[in-house]
Amino acid sequence: MISTRSKTTRLTTNRSQDFTNTHNYSGGPGVLPESVLQKTQEAIRQAPGTDISLLGISHRSAWFRNVLDEAEANIRTLLNVPYTYHILFLQGGGTMQFSMVPMNMLKERTQCADYITTGYWSEKAVAEAEKEGAVNQAWNGCHEGFHRLPAPSELKLSNHAAYLHYVSNETVEGLQFPFLPGLPHVPRVCDMSSDFLSKPFDITNYSLVYAHAQKNLGPAGVTIAIVHEDVLRNAPDKLPSIMDYRLFAEHRSNFNTPPVFAIYTVNLVTRWLLDEIGGLVNMSLINSAKAAVVYASIDLSDGFYRGRASCDSRSQMNASFTLPNEKLTTAFLHHACMAGFVGLEGHRSVGGIRASLYNGLTLEAAEDLAEFMNWFRSEYGCYRHSEVRNG
Ligand SMILES: Cc1ncc(COP(=O)(O)O)c(C=O)c1O
């Protein structure tokens, strides 16, 4: 851990020529492991076992078929996914899933779908689902400003819903579900875009899970969906091909041209999780340690930093917090940038600061940020939220 003294040195050194110590806390696309970046760079020049660049390899080649198969096998191993589930590599991001899920699971049904509205991204999911069928908002935290998640007893669930949709980790507000919501007989669908592969979970609790890659698993361009075979069996006819999970399952994710580069990188991240981290239990321990040091700096700041999320809803992936006023927020970001800490601006819809602590961010980077936060408070800590507003 870098001492406060050396951190101060970081602050006073001109780092513009030296990015080697830069820490990236971006909300997404997020930081990737150094060893993965290294291998990706090499493959862009020459893909292993070939004479050509990764960027020019045919998606119909045996080489790429092996990449797809290995990525699928690695995800199966990491999450212990049974063969009753298809693992699909799709495009269109999390946003396309907001439509693809209700098109496959709600359209032409007499039932409604239950949605739990907990923040910016679940609101977007609801808006798209309403275009395809009837939606019941089982809970909506909007009137409270999305500062917390519901307790299980607050959910107004429909007994015969086509499915229940929720977002396991609200990336903007920094809220992460500490429990499994829903009724045992209603299919669960979850947007895990910002916490997929950050910890173990039991896939058999779900009918469908989706996650875009650009937080924990790779670059933007590929979205992973794990879909139970019953979802495919019950999907309506005549969906647009690109929105039909069945076609991607039949073609083993090679229906139209898949994002070869992004899938290659995801495969490297799955290898890194298995071989270097040692699986998702270990990854989860590292992620918990990272979150603990950053939240400790908030909690021990005597009110200088204020967490957006209530303590029982806090995200291990995105620590969202505010400073007493805008001037201090600007000063914080300025000093952070000078010290080599980037990507800390809060989402444009909420402002403040957001430290994203995805899989690729090292424990050292989280400790360095915590130490920087403590240093900044020691310099500017005379201000409190209650004392100064927008001054
Ligand atoms: C939880 C969650 N869902 C969905 C999305 C939208 O994803 P995309 O930009 O890939 O469409 C995001 C974006 O950050 C997100 O964080």
Image (cartoon, rainbow, N blue to C red):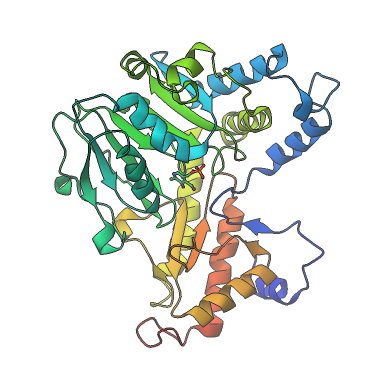
Q: Position of residue 54 (x, y in %)?
A: 76, 28
Q: Position of residue 323 (x, y in %)?
A: 46, 75
- Residue drawn at point x = 31 percent, y = 59 percent: 146
The residue nearer to you, when weighing 175 against 52, is 52
Label count reads 0
227 up-or-down from 343: above or below: above
Q: Is residue 385 left or right of residue 33?
A: left
- In this view of the protein, can residue 196 be seen by the observer? no
- Residue drawn at point x = 56 percent, y = 68 percent: 371
**Identity of the residue furthest to the right in this view:** 51
- Residue drawn at point x = 40 percent, y = 57 percent: 173
37 up-or-down from 87: above or below: below
Q: Position of residue 307 (x, y in %)?
A: 39, 66
**Looking at the rendering, which quadrant does residue 219 occupy?**
top right
- Residue drawn at point x = 59 percent, y = 47 percent: 29
**Looking at the rendering, which quadrant does residue 126 occupy?**
top left
Q: Is residue 171 left or right of residue 43?
A: left
126 up-or-down from 149: above or below: above
- In this view of the protein, can residue 322 be seen by the observer? yes
Q: Position of residue 224 (x, y in %)?
A: 50, 30
The residue nearer to you, when weighing 347 against 333, is 347
Q: Quadrant of the N terminus?
A: bottom right
Q: Is residue 267 left or right of residue 136?
A: right
The residue nearer to you, when weighing 371 against 114, is 114
